[in-house]
Amino acid sequence: MSAVGAALDEARGRLRLTAYQLDALALAVRSAPTETPEQERAVGELRTAGILDDENRVHPLAAQFALAMTTPLIRVLVETSGPQGTSAAHMTVAGEDVWYGEPWPGTGPDDAVTYQHSELPTIIWDLGRLAGLHRSKVPSGATALSAPLGLVDIVLELASLGPQEWDAARTVALATTHDRWPDLDDDTRNRWLALVATLRSWWRVTVSWGDEGAGTGRWLSVLDCGTEGYWRWDEPVDSADDGGPSVTLHPVSGGQLWESLQGLLPTSAELRVAVESGQS
């Protein structure tokens, strides 16, 4: 295992790469020369890890990974925010092959990311794990909740803070909700206060397909509020009362989110249309 991050695990179908090493791998796949000392150093690290040989030929597992990353039919972005910070995991699907990265919160270009090979039949399990999906029931008496978009923005901002700011920001949000939105009815305010008080994380899964994924896709955005359960929200709409944007959140179970993740994936007909459009 290389001390600089690059690693190859053929038995478990894994690669570990920094952003710089990923760029160097892309050059090797295209048989393109390096142009900077950083790229040359990254190539040497890939050789040490066994991802490239002495003639810069790419290991078959790494070549499969590069093909999926550069010519995928389906692209997935899993964004998560929690007390330890934010992360964005990318997944690509090419044929029956699935590849996805598992970055830690706060990962930068100098940090190594593990890229895992998987297969299409297990993609929902993979998506659920990347999002942190767990079993959860809808709280008793919970119903759909509409609130100003600004109130949701506070929750999203809270979910993106680091561990040193999380608790303090939660306290401020709880204390200022009444002053900032005095017209909220008591039921809505109390439910929002409960969601903020129990917020564990926010996650969003975006699926796109076709040529560069342009304009074709679906998304799912969720608050994980611990004892208050999961809350899925819809696109903001203009409120009939004051014209300002509002968001509706729906209480959902873990099982319902599992089904929603399945619904994000394109059907065979949608993929066929996308492929035909790309060829025209």
Image (cartoon, rainbow, N blue to C red):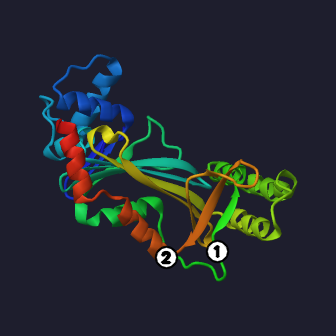
User: Quadrant location of residue 53?
Assistant: top left
Residue at the far top: name it.
35
Percent x, y of residue 269: 23, 56
Depth check, mark 1 against mark 2: the one in front is 1
Q: Residue at x 67, y 66 (%)?
A: 145
Query: Compared to 87, does 48 lie above or below?
Result: above
Q: Residue at x 45, y 75 (%)?
A: 255
- From the viewer's side, name the closer residue of 18 and 49: 18
Q: Residue at x 20, y 45 (%)?
A: 275
Pointer 1: what residue? Answer: 143
Percent x, y of residue 119: 23, 60
Percent x, y of residue 102: 40, 52
- Say whether residue 143 is left or right of residue 171: left
Query: Compared to 137, does 238 lie above or below?
Result: above
Q: Secondary structure at mark 2?
A: loop
User: Quadrant location of residue 66?
Assistant: top left
> How many neighbours does mark 2 have within 10 angstroms: few (below 14), some (14-19), or many (20 or more)?
few
Of the numbered discs 1 and 2, the one sitting upstream in the chain is 2
Q: Can the viewer see residue 62?
A: no
- From the viewer's side, name the closer residue of 124 and 146: 146
Looking at the figure, which quarter contains the C terminus? Answer: top left
Amino acid type of the residue tagged 1 in the rendering: Thr
Percent x, y of residue 18: 37, 38
Pointer 2: what residue? Answer: 135
- Say whether residue 249 is left or right of residue 197: left
Amino acid type of the residue tagged 2 in the rendering: Arg
Q: Secondary structure at mark 1?
A: loop
Residue at the far front: name it.
240
In space, the residues marked 1 and 2 are separated at their CA atoms by 19 Å
